Image: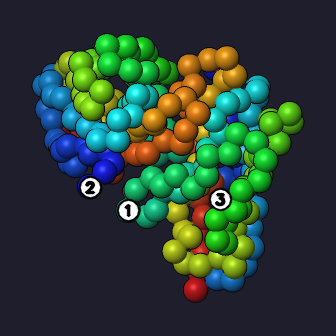
Amino acid sequence: NAGVTQTPKFQVLKTGQSMTLQCAQDMNHEYMSWYRQDPGMGLRLIHYSVGAGITDQGEVPNGYNVSRSTTEDFPLRLLSAAPSQTSVYFCASSYSRDNGYTFGSGTRLTVV
Amino acid sequence: GIQVEQSPPDLILQEGANSTLRCNFSDSVNNLQWFHQNPWGQLINLFYIPSGTKQNGRLSATTVATERYSLLYISSSQTTDSGVYFCAGSPAGGSYIPTFGRGTSLIVHP
């Protein structure tokens, strides 16, 4: 099915552990973004990419890394998990800058 | 960055009622969009509406770009309309990556 696929859907980490949240889209979208959603805060931009090989920081990038080696994939890496990174993470993509965004179903991450 | 203000923050309706949600931007924006987050957390794109008016069934949206606001109209509301509605836009001349408001939480009672 065409769309944005995020894995895993749920994850529990211990403080200090690292992990990678996966995001893949099969719509040939150039623009991809990672957001985190916390209660009452809306969605805040972590990192984004406007094409393969191009990434940039958003509003809350600290503690996260990204890379974009292919058009399809945009993984988000947590380097050393902290309780403050407990959140729901959404990946989104768009065909171009003048098109609407499609969201994945999210990853609920808990850091203990 | 731009500031995105949504009003009202919370809204409770009886089934069949109409409502208007508003989104104000602190500066000119590109690619204004409206999203619905259902009670299961899924985010659905309702409208891509940088200017003008669009309609999709019982929902319609109007963006007045020169005055930096957008409205989402919900007519004859149904319980399935419950959830959180977000608007988002990116600064004109910027990265074209949307900044989101904090949302309007809507509950529709049967």
Name the side, left or right, on which B103 lies relative to A36: right
Contact (CB < 8 A) between labels 3 and 2? no
Count residues near mark 3 (Cα–Cα under 10 Å), then give few for <14, some for 14-19, many for 20+: few
Task: Name the residue at the bottom extreme.
Answer: B110
The residue pinned by badge 3 equals: B10
Q: Are marks 2 and 1 on the same chain?
A: no
- Residue at x 26%, y 45% (from the top left corner): A5
Q: Nearer the viewer, mark 1 or mark 3?
A: 1
Question: Which sits in the foreground, A41 or B37?
Answer: B37
Name the side, left or right, on which A31 lies relative to B26: left
Between the residue at mark 3 and the residue at mark 2, the CA separation in whole angstroms equals 35 Å
User: Which amino acid type corresponds to the residue marked 1 in the rendered image?
Assistant: Trp
The residue pinned by badge 1 equals: B40
Q: Disc 1 is attached to a residue of which chain? A: B
The residue pinned by badge 2 equals: A1
State the image coordinates of residue A69 (x, y, percent, origin top left).
Answer: 24, 18
- Residue at x 55%, y 78% (from the top left corner): B79
Q: Disc 2 is attached to a residue of which chain? A: A
- Residue at x 43%, y 21% (from the top left corner): A50
Disc 1 is placed on an element classified as: loop
Q: Nearer the viewer, mark 2 or mark 1?
A: 2
Count residues near mark 1 (Cα–Cα under 10 Å), then give few for <14, some for 14-19, many for 20+: few
Contact (CB < 8 A) between labels 2 and 1? no
The label on residue B30 is none
Task: Name the residue at the front extreme.
Answer: A28
Name the side, left or right, on which B28 lies relative to A64: right
Between the residue at mark 1 and the residue at mark 3, the CA separation in whole angstroms equals 18 Å
Name the side, left or right, on which A69 lies relative to A34: left
Question: Does any portion of residue B102 appear in the rendered image?
Answer: yes
Q: Disc 3 is attached to a residue of which chain? A: B
